[in-house]
Image: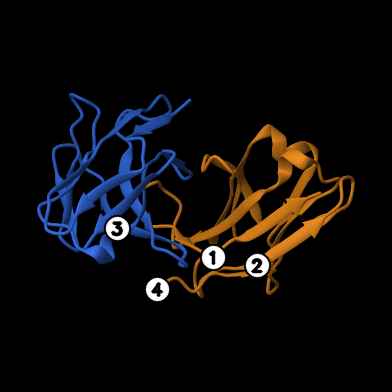
Chain colours: A blue, B orange
């Protein structure tokens, strides 16, 4: 079946530092899945951060960006300068014809 | 912000008891998904519907789990005979269309504890 592997946490960085959370996928049900990053902030529900549906394209939101690389089957999440408010759990996911397959999440803590 | 409503937020049951949770999808969203997130943060897709029809479901769902999305009523997920391993966060999500590129909007979840 489909699977997603992402950076094991927890990850701790200082405010204004750069961040990369790795994500690689394996899709057996569909050749080119749609790729997503979801985020769960403390006390809140899961929400979409960004998505990319076309290989080779980049998605961005709230200063985060991720590029869909079909050669390396990766979709790493990056941010040039993190803020304390970015502390959350980040989930990489792939979508086939309907359901999502999630990674196990990466807990990010940003120190002031 | 998502407007998917899930009730109850917390549910505590003994082994062998029924456990039922409900979901009201976002207005105008005909597609509903149920996922289970266990204590290791692993997600498992359970079932999805378009309007009242089941689109996909896993084997686990077919045995002890039952779900429905009746017209003009909340969707529901019920575990017929709860087991300790069912303790998890159950997430409902809704979407405008089927197809993996349509955003799924998640509710806050129902946390089930089976004693």
In the picture as drawn, the residue positioned furthest to the right comes out as: B16
Give the residue number, with chain letter if any, for mark 2: B9
Q: Alpha-carbon distance for marks 1 and 2?
A: 8 Å
Q: Tag 4 or tag 1, which sits nearer the N-term?
A: 4
Q: Residues within 10 Å of mark 4 (few under 14, many from 20)?
A: few
Give the residue number, with chain letter if any, for mark 3: A49
CB under 8 Å between callouts 3 and 1?
no
Residue at 22%, 50% in the rendered image? A13
Q: How crowded is mark 2: few (under 14 residues within 10 Å), some or many (20 or more)?
A: some
Q: Alpha-carbon distance for marks 1 and 4?
A: 11 Å
Residue at 45%, 67% in the rendered image? A44
Q: Tag 2 or tag 1, which sits nearer the N-term?
A: 2
The dot on residue B84 is: none
CB under 8 Å between callouts 2 and 3?
no
The dot on residue B108 is: 1
Q: How crowded is mark 3: few (under 14 residues within 10 Å), some or many (20 or more)?
A: some
Asked whether, in this view, residue A59 is left or right of residue B90, the answer is left
Mark 3 lies on a secondary structure that is strand
- Tell us which disc is closer to us: 4 or 2: 2
Tell me where residue A105 appears, x and y as whole percent: 40, 43
Indicate whether B66 appears above or below A6.
below
Q: Alpha-carbon distance for marks 3 and 1?
A: 16 Å
Q: Alpha-carbon distance for marks 4 and 3?
A: 12 Å
State whether discs 1 and 4 lie on one chain.
yes
Residue at 71%, 55% in the rendered image? B112
State whether discs 4 and 2 lie on one chain.
yes
The mark tally for this picture is 4
- Chain under numbered label 2: B
Give the residue number, with chain letter if any, for mark 4: B1
Mark 2 lies on a secondary structure that is loop
Q: Alpha-carbon distance for marks 2 and 3?
A: 24 Å
CB under 8 Å between callouts 1 and 2?
yes
């Amino acid at each position: 079946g489909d699977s997603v592997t992402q950076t094991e946490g927890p990850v701790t960085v200082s405010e204004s530092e750069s961040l990369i959370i790795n994500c690689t996928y394996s899709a057996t049900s569909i050749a080119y899945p749609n790729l997503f990053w979801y985020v769960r902030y403390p006390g809140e529900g899961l929400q979409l951060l960004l998505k990319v549906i076309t290989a080779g394209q980049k998605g961005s939101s709230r200063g985060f960006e991720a590029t869909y690389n079909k050669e390396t089957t990766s979709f790493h999440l990056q941010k040039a300068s993190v803020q304390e408010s970015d502390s959350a759990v980040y989930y990489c996911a792939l979508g086939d014809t309907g359901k999502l397959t999630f990674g196990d999440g990466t807990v990010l803590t940003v120190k002031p | 912000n998502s407007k998917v409503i899930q009730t109850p937020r917390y549910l505590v049951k003994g082994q062998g008891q029924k456990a039922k949770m409900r979901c009201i999808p976002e207005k105008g969203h005909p597609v509903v998904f149920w996922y289970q997130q266990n204590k290791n943060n692993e997600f498992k897709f359970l079932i999805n519907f378009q309007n009242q029809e089941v689109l996909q479901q896993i084997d686990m769902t077919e045995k002890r789990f039952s779900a429905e999305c009746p017209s003009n009523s909340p969707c529901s997920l019920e575990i017929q005979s709860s087991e300790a391993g069912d303790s998890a966060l159950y997430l409902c999500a809704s979407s405008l269309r089927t197809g993996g590129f349509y955003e799924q909007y998640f509710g806050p979840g129902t946390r089930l504890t089976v004693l």
